[in-house]
Amino acid sequence: MLANTKVNAELTGGLITLDKIVRKTDTKQRRTKIVCTMGPASWSSENIGVLMDSGMNVARFNFSHGDHEGHGQVLDRLREVAMVKSRNIAVMLDTKGPEIRTGMLAAENKKMELTKGETLILTTDYEFKGDHTKLACSYPSLATDVTPGQQILVADGSLVLTVLTCDADKGEVACRIENNAVLGERKNMNLPGVKVGLPTFTEKDVHDIVEFGVKRGVEFIAASFIRKAEDVKKLKKLLEDNGGGHIKIISKIENQEGLENFDEILKETDAVMVARGDLGMEIPASKVFLAQKMMIRKCNIAGKPVITATQMLESMITNPRPTRAECSDVANAVMDGTDAVMLSGETANGPYFEEAVTVMARTVCEAEHNVNHRLLFRTLINSIMADYGSMTMGESMSSSAVKTAIDIDAKLIVVLSDSGKMANYVARFRPGVPALMVSSNLVACRQASGLMMGMHTILVDSLEDSESVIEEVNYELVNSKTMCVGDKIIVVAGRMTGMKEQLRVIVLNEGKSHGRLVEGGGLFFNRGMMLSFSSK
């Protein structure tokens, strides 16, 4: 992303002034979306409402924990609060995915001390109860997949092992312990650089996706440990075969194999999550930021939403204020071009969940205020044409809408869209003004509000009489004092039932109400604000 002051490139930071540093943050026109993880700290109806008011766009349900009954109760509360508050909040089901774990321990206290320099045997006999000399591993092919000299990381890297020898017949691997550590039972294990022979979707994942995701109507599936395009194709088929073809797929890139196959994965997926936690176990931590920038850039050019996740405000799980480095991390992700940022334990387990979302919203807004959208638009067009050579009709119309908004100083881009496809095209070109998708499809509204940068949504009863819909939008913009008579807006629409493609400029007048808005279908007009949450 660029943050320059003129059409020609120059050093970043040209838009930053002392006044911007000292004045109060304006979050009313936030563009970057915020994903919040549901958990015990925040899953009551009251606290879900607090998350929404603070800036949550997507509610993440982590299926590494909990059961369907518990998640279902939280989802019911979420939908109820969203309806009362008139918020189009999307729901993300995050799969547990395949995993490798250590086994059980023989010690009564279920812990063991390991000493640097000693040898530890890993056995694939998962029934074995371990001690400081021998430990079980759940991966059956360990002894054939690793080689001497490779490292094995245990418990999020708190224990580092170096492979010495492999005995495939016994299913054992001898390792040197590289650091002192105290280890409990069933800790996660990472095999950096190894192409692990585990299925991408476990039986639990399939059950969670079909029995909860499809039946309970989630908007997104975040698929853990996507390693190749075929993984995405299999998930698409699973969803289509079970009536969930409308659910969008977010591919989580968490290992080196996923990075190596990223271009093919990107062609198949609907969105991407830069899952920096496990990725930082698979590649050197000093290179994670490079992988992040590479993936975000490619997603921006392809027009696929991208989420930056893991440890963004980690210290706020236990502290009311973030570290300066954490805020810089969030801001740099925005400057890279991320569409969304994600909070995990900060909102699921910490008492400062409201503060975490508020800090996140303020930080992304400060970063956004230093983007030159005119230069960014031109850079995106050049990059898209360099990579793809041409655009589709919808892409061309959307880019023209954004360019026109820049040229005539329009205040808003209105997108009439049934599926959200045209809205995604508009978001791809990063307009410097707010964009509003008007749709009769509630799922599409939630998906667009959830992950499309700068996109807000309003639900209407139908798009068949587009003129009355546009008049209604005109009326609401002026009546709510969101905009004034004489302001210019851009209206763009793709081919839909009873309507041809259109791109036009409208000068606002008093407008006329036709009663087309659906109650509870969006808050864009209700407070005369550009976003559906209050500035704090």
Image (tube, grey):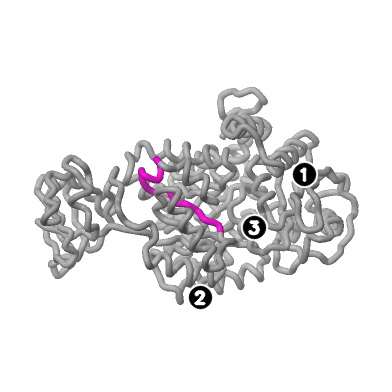
Dot 2 falls on a residue whose secondary structure is helix
- Whole-number angstrom distance, CA of label 1 to CA of label 2: 40 Å
- Whole-number angstrom distance, CA of label 2 to CA of label 3: 24 Å
User: Which residue lies at the image location 59% right of the left edge and 23% below the top edge?
Assistant: 10
Viewer-nearest of discs 2 and 3: 2
Location of the N terminus by quadrant is: top right
Q: Residues within 10 Å of mark 2 (few under 14, many from 20)?
A: few
Dot 1 falls on a residue whose secondary structure is loop
Disc assigned to residue 533: 3
**Magenta segment boundaries in residue numbering:** 248-260
Q: Do we see residue 296 in this rendering?
A: yes
Q: Which residue is mark 2?
A: 73
Q: Residues within 10 Å of mark 3 (few under 14, many from 20)?
A: many
Instruction: Report the side of 131 relative to 26 (left or right).
Output: left
**Is 385 situated above or below 119?**
above
Q: Which residue is mark 1?
A: 411
Label 1 vs 2, first from the N-terminus:
2
User: Residue flagged by tag 3: what amino acid is it?
Assistant: Phe
Give the image location of residue 13, x and y in percent: 57, 29
User: Residue flagged by tag 1: what amino acid is it?
Assistant: Lys
